[in-house]
Amino acid sequence: MVERVTATDAALDLIEKLREKHGPLMFHQSGGCCDGSSPMCYQEGDLLIGSQDVLLGEIGQTPFYINKKQYDYWKHTQLIIDVVDGRGGMFSLEGVEGKRFLSRSRAFTDEEYQELKAANQV
């Protein structure tokens, strides 16, 4: 089955580096406010997950969440988490590394979307 969220090798390398430094991690796709719409990386438990958060999947053995309202807009797309040089969100762990996580996306093919729908994942 197609994954709802995936990551580039560079992102996976940075996740591993952050896990070695900080222990278990979690991601939440920010929906705006202070940090725009960046994927935010936290130590596991530093952000409380609520009933309006959707678990998209895992990247680098790290859970990745998104708010349901934002998910409703993006449910037709696969999120591809990448990393680029620069300062990340002020609350995200990678900021001090001189890197920032970045969300890229691509629309699911009709076949992929139907597969997700059949599995009750849409």
Image: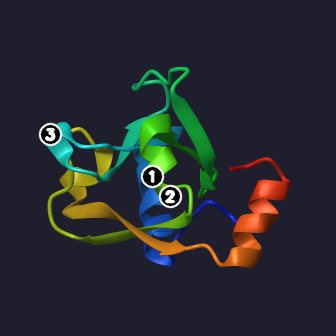
The quarter holding residue 2 reads: bottom right
Q: Is residue 98 left or right of residue 71?
A: left
The image position of residue 60, as x and y in percent, is: 59, 58
From mark 2 to mark 1, how far is it between C-alphas?
Answer: 30 Å
Dot 2 and dot 1 residues touching (CB under 8 Å): no
Mark 2 or 1, nearer chain start:
2
The image position of residue 86, as x and y in percent, is: 15, 66
The numbered disc on residue 16 is 2
Total labels: the figure holds 3
Q: Amino acid at mark 2?
A: Glu
From mark 2 to mark 3, how far is it between C-alphas?
Answer: 26 Å
Residue at 50% from the left image edge and 58% from the top image edge: 16
- Quarter that holds the N terminus: bottom right
Dot 2 and dot 3 residues touching (CB under 8 Å): no
Q: Secondary structure at mark 1?
A: helix
- Res. 106 visible in picture: yes
From mark 1 to mark 3, how far is it between C-alphas?
Answer: 20 Å
The numbered disc on residue 73 is 1
Query: Can you say whether 81 is above or below 65 in the image?
Result: below
The numbered disc on residue 34 is 3
The image position of residue 21, as x and y in percent, is: 41, 45
Q: Secondary structure at mark 3?
A: helix
Mark 1 or 3, nearer chain start:
3
Residue at 50% from the left image edge and 24% from the top image edge: 49
Q: Amino acid at mark 3?
A: Cys
